[in-house]
Image: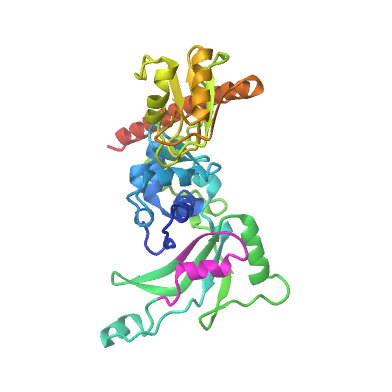
Amino acid sequence: KMADDTPTPAPAATPEAMTTSLVERLHFFFSNANLRQDKWMRTEMKENGCITLDQLLKFQTIKSISTDKQLLVKAAGELKEEITYDAEKEELRRVVPFDWETMGDGSHLSLCCKNVPLTEEEKSEGEKAFYGAKHEYAVTRDELKALFEPFGKVGIVKLRFGRKEGKAYPLGMAIIEFENEEGMAKASAELLPKEGEAKEIEIKGNKLTFETVKPMKCFQKGAKRARDDKKDDKDKQEKEEEEEIKFEPVKVEMVKGCVIALTGLSDETCDRESIREAVSDILKVTKDIKTSGLYVDYTRGATSGNLRLTESKPEEMKELVAKMNDGTILIANAKVGSAKMLEGEEEVAYWKGFEEFLNNRKRADLEEKRQKKKQKRFSHKGR
C-alpha cells in the first residue's frame, strides 16, 4: 500500500471495536478515492473481479486490527451497498465496478491545501544543504482529515512529496479529496468563495491556503485519457462495446412447506457444517451434501439462515422446529433465537429471493468469465 496515502486505523480491542475499524478499512480500500491511486487493487479487481479474504488479511492496516476472517466478513456485511461477499469463494467485490470513464481522476472532488506545517528538527549540515532546515511533515493525515470532516466525508488525504536525487522531501502541500460533491461544494463555498472573505483554517500555527485541483491532462476536455497499462490501451483502441450479459434466467419452482427460517445464530461459531450436523437426524436425511436433499442457506458470520428441503417432511420439520425453540437441539453448542416453518407471503418472498440470488450469481459468473477471456486475449496480443 502507499504509505503516505493510507490513513492509520485507530487501535481496537473488543470485537465490536475491531468490527467498526474493519468496516472503515474496507470502505477505504474499495472506495473510488483509494482505487484511483492503488494500481495493485485496480489490476487485481480488473483481472479477477474481486479481492479474496486471504489477500485482504495480508494488508498491514487490516491484520493489525484482526486476522479473524469471521470479523472481516461481519464488517463486509455492514457495507452491503458498497461491496458484496461470496461465501463459497471467500471473495469481496464492489457493487459498482470501478470505471475510469465515470469515476474520473477525483480532481472535481479535491482541494489543494498549501502551507501545511513542517518540522524544524535538528538535522546534519549535509541534510540541511540537501533538503533545507525543514523536511518532515508536522501533521498527520488523520489530523488533516479531522480538520475537513465538518465540510463532508473525506475520502483520502494525500501528503505531497517531491524528489531530489532519488530522495523524497515534503512539499508542504496536501490534496484533500471528498467522497461526494456535497462535501466539496460546501468546502469550496467557505474556503474559495466567489464573493466575500474566505474562511480561515489554521493548524499548528500555520494558516492554510487553498486552490482547486486541475484535472490530469488525460481527463481534460478534448484530451484522450491514457490508460494505466498496455492492456487498457489496446482495449480503448478497439472500442469494444460492453453489452449487458444475456442469459437464460433461472426459474425456480416453489415447493410449499419445505423451508425453515432460523434466527439468533451465533455469528462466531455457527457454520453450514454445524447446522447440518444438528438437524439431519431429526429430518431423517443423510449428512452427505450431494444426496441428503437438504440445503443450508447460510453465510458464515451471519445470525440468520434457512433450511431448504427438496420435498416436504411436515412431521419431521415440526418436530425439529419445536426442539430448536425449546433448546433441546443446539447449533454449535448454542440455542437458536427462533425457528419456524415459512408459510404464505413469507414463503413466497423466500423463493422469490432465492431465484433472484441464483440469477445474480449466474450473471456474476458470466461476467467474470468474460473479463478473464478478454484479459487472456490481450495478454496474447501483447507477446
* Location of residue 237 (image quadrant): top left
Relative to 254, does residue 353 appear above or below in the rendering?
A: below
Please report the residue visible at 56 percent of the width from the left and 70 percent of the height from the top. 147
Q: Position of residue 248 (x, y in %)?
A: 52, 17
Please report the residue visible at 44 percent of the width from the left and 49 percent of the height from the top. 226
* Left or right placement of residue 260 versus residue 42 in this view: right
Quadrant of the drawing holding the N terminus: bottom left
Q: Observer-nearest residue: 55 or 130? A: 55
Relative to 134, does residue 169 appear above or below in the rendering?
A: above
The total number of labels drawn is 0
What residue occupies the far right of the structure in this picture? 195
Quadrant of the drawing holding the C terminus: top left
Please report the residue visible at 47 percent of the width from the left and 72 percent of the height from the top. 173
Q: Observer-nearest residue: 355 or 198? A: 355
Is residue 142 one of those drawn in magenta? yes
Q: Observer-nearest residue: 45 or 340? A: 340
Q: Is residue 192 visible?
A: no
Q: Is residue 205 visible?
A: yes
* Location of residue 289 (image quadrant): top left
Asked which colour scheme the image uses, the reply is rainbow
Please report the residue visible at 56 percent of the width from the left and 15 percent of the height from the top. 257
Is residue 126 one of those drawn in magenta? no
Q: Observer-nearest residue: 267 or 334? A: 334
Relative to 381, does residue 148 appear above or below in the rendering?
A: below
Q: Position of residue 5 (x, y in %)?
A: 42, 62
Q: Position of residue 149 (x, y in %)?
A: 58, 64
Q: Position of residue 46 (x, y in %)?
A: 41, 40
Magenta range is 137-158
